[in-house]
Image (cartoon, rainbow, N blue to C red):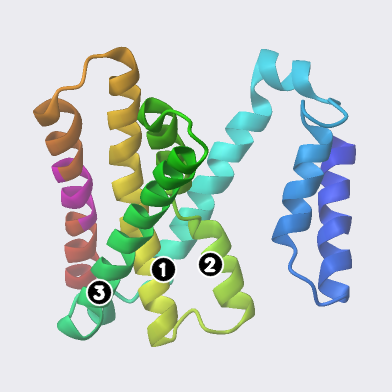
Amino acid sequence: LALFLMAQWYAGRLCLSLKLPTIPVEIAVGLLFGPHGFDLIPEFSRDYMPLSLLGFLGVGIVIFESGMHLNIERVCNWEIGHHVVGVAVLGTAMPIALGIAVFAAMGADIYPNGLAAGFSLAPTSVGISLTMLTRAKQLNSRCGQIIMSAAFLDDIFSIIFLVILINLAKGELNIVLHVIIPLISALGFVAIGAIMSVTII
């Protein structure tokens, strides 16, 4: 684990010194140490799950940090709001369509394999967006705010699609229980957070 963390840190520093993007190299280091690479920490990870826990905590912290950089007043207006919705809808729909189209072109099953591939491509990485916009010093720009807000909305849509996919696999899909209620709950949670952030400030 210490070797893995050290490799990640030095790989990132090397890329920064060469003015190269760090994220692809960090992903490559993770694959190198994982079960499909040198398989150095699989049993430790499977038995005790500390790496999964650290991963969830890291994603939570990144999402929290991303939310701290969103300007609700700028996003929740007609000037930017419709762009956010448009980018989020396209960012969710196009990967799903692409996954289905690629499977159809290969002659593979569109359902469930093509649909599952499309759903897996749909989520937007808030962490990568935050990192790249911060390094480019564009996080607080109009374009940066649109990208970050669309990434959040895209992730909400993707979570709903994940719930749909899981229940389709079980053969227990209920539109009201597995689509409408999670969608309303997620959007309601975001709306309450946005309202509270504006009123408290």
User: In the rendered structure, which amino acid carries the disc numbered 2?
Assistant: Leu
Residue 120 highlighted magenta (yes or no): no
Mark 3 Cα shell of 10 Å, populated few (<14), some (14-19), many (≥20): few
Which residue is label 3 attached to? 201
Q: What residue is drawn where x is 77% and y is 25%?
A: 35
Mark 1 Cα shell of 10 Å, populated few (<14), some (14-19), many (≥20): many
**Which badge, 1 or 2, comes first in the chain's sequence?**
2
Label 1 SS: helix
Which residue is label 1 attached to? 148
Instruction: From the viewer's side, name the closer residue of 47 and 169.
Output: 169
Residue 187 highlighted magenta (yes or no): yes
User: In the rendered structure, which amino acid carries the disc numbered 3?
Assistant: Ile
Which residue is label 2 attached to? 130
User: In the rendered structure, which amino acid carries the disc numbered 1?
Assistant: Met
Quadrant housing residue 47: top right
- Classify the position of the N terminus by image quarter: top right
